Amino acid sequence: SQQGEEDPQALSIQEGENATMNCSYKTSINNLQWYRQNSGRGLVHLILIRSNEREKHSGRLRVTLDTSKKSSSLLITASRAADTASYFCATDDDSGAGSYQLTFGKGTKLSVIP
Amino acid sequence: KAGVTQTPRYLIKTRGQQVTLSCSPISGHRSVSWYQQTPGQGLQFLFEYFSETQRNKGNFPGRFSGRQFSNSRSEMNVSTLELGDSALYLCASSLGYGGDNEQFFGPGTRLTVL
């Protein structure tokens, strides 16, 4: 089952602009991760934010988490053509056996136009 | 360190056949997870292995199975292939198991079922 839902499904911006992607989820989580996938390739981990954190930065990336609204956002500042990719949020989903698995959303497809 | 490797990268099979995919994790990683990615369903969790034991299993039929060896390498097998099994199969490794571990993904195996 899909836990996270990204919004928008697709986003097209000019190089140098900021890109914001949102993720909403349904159940309580311990942490939320963001991944990037270039066309047809494996995913690359970007950032992990824990449920007791509200904001986290990594280079040009800024992630926020609002557990009361069950939502997260990923901001990419000063975008580059190389940022063109699909971005996924992933939440840990309590599978009920005392351990967890990652559940991915369907992703936001970002196109950065040079 | 070498990244996660998956073999083969591309595979074409016909309905009813079976297939085995292989994944070699990053050295020192003991957890291997498998995902199926399709345009319609997105990324779906198949199973996770840690220290040769299956820790989690997604909602897939019994035709999908896997195993992990003592060197942490993992294989997944799909028997009696169906057209709907055409997908990108991604393997990811991590140090530990569970949703709070950063996962390192391989490039995937593109399976086409005719």
Image (cartoon, coloured by chain):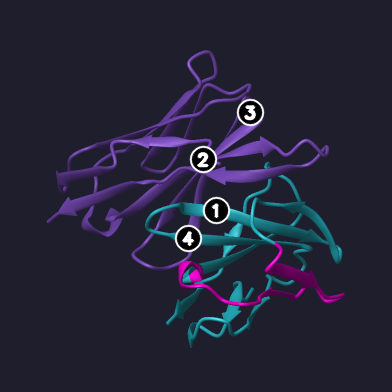
Chain colours: A purple, B cyan
Q: Is residue B36 above or below residue B110?
A: above
Which residue is tagged 1? Answer: B44
Q: What residue occupies the far top of the structure in this picture? A: A68
Nearer the viewer's eye, disc 4 or disc 3? Answer: 4
Query: As rendered, which of B113 and A35 lies closer to the eye?
Result: B113
Q: Residue at x 39, y 54 (%)?
A: B40
Image quadrant where residue A11 sits = top left
Amino acid type of the residue tagged 3 in the rendering: Ile
Callout 3: SS: loop
| Label 1 Cα neighbours within 10 Å, binned few <14 / some 14-19 / many ≥20 | many
Which image quarter holds the C terminus of chain B? bottom left
Q: Which residues are magenta?
A: B62-85
Callout 4: SS: strand
Which image quarter holds the N terminus of chain B? bottom right
Distance Cα–Cα, label 4 vs label 1: 6 Å
Amino acid type of the residue tagged 2 in the rendering: Gln
Q: Which mark is residue B37?
A: 4
Nearer the viewer's eye, disc 1 or disc 3? Answer: 1
